[in-house]
Amino acid sequence: MIEISDKIVTKREAVAQGLINISPGVIKLIKDKKIPKGDVLETARVAGILAAKQTPNLLPLCHPIAIEFAQIEFKFGKNQIVISAVIRGHAKTGFEMEALTAVSVSALTIYDMCKAFDKDMVIGDVKVMCKSGGKSGNYVRKS
């Protein structure tokens, strides 16, 4: 792990995004809550939040930091669901890994719950969209 003991605690936020390509028919099943395993998006939301909280247990060199806010949102496209995670708190290091983990596990949950209906789903384009706080300041993805 990198040394952070001399860093000061600041308010920090990270936003990550990813997507899952999925057939329009399965998107309709999700919207209509017709997937037999249950409400796909609410399950994926809870899974993403729980995953964010477990990030240091999954990534061996990630510092354990207290998450004070976590939000997962979903937007439907014709052939995809875009997943966004916002993670916020006061810490000595940022929340990028927690946000990326939240998006990834949310997408995996959607895949798991829908795999009986669409085996061609693809998870991808997981990235940090922006971050704020800390010595390095703010970052906003340009593309």
Image (tube, rainbow, N blue to C red):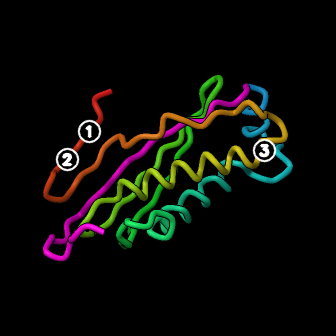
Q: Which residue is mark 3?
A: 33
Q: Where in the figure is residue 43, as x and y percent of width and height?
A: 68, 56
Between residues 99 and 119, which one lies in front from this camera angle? 119
Label 1 crowd bin: few (<14), some (14–19), many (20+), radius 10 Å: few
Q: Earlier in the sequence, mark 2 or mark 3?
A: 3
Residue under the point 73% across and 48% down: 112
State the separation of the CA atoms marked 3 and 1. Answer: 35 Å
Is residue 30 rendered to the left or right of residue 88?
right
Q: Observer-nearest residue: 43 or 127?
A: 127
Q: Amino acid at mark 2?
A: Asn
x then y, percent, for residue 84: 48, 44
Residue beneath disc 1? 140
| Residue 16 in magenta stretch | yes
Question: Residue shown at 79%/36% (left/top)?
Answer: 29
Q: Is residue 57 magenta?
A: no
Return the residue nearer the eye: 24 or 115: 115
- Judged left or right of residue 46, residue 60 is left
Amino acid type for the residue under numbered disc 1: Val
- Give the residues in magenta: 1-23
Looking at the rendered structure, which numbered label has been put on residue 138?
2
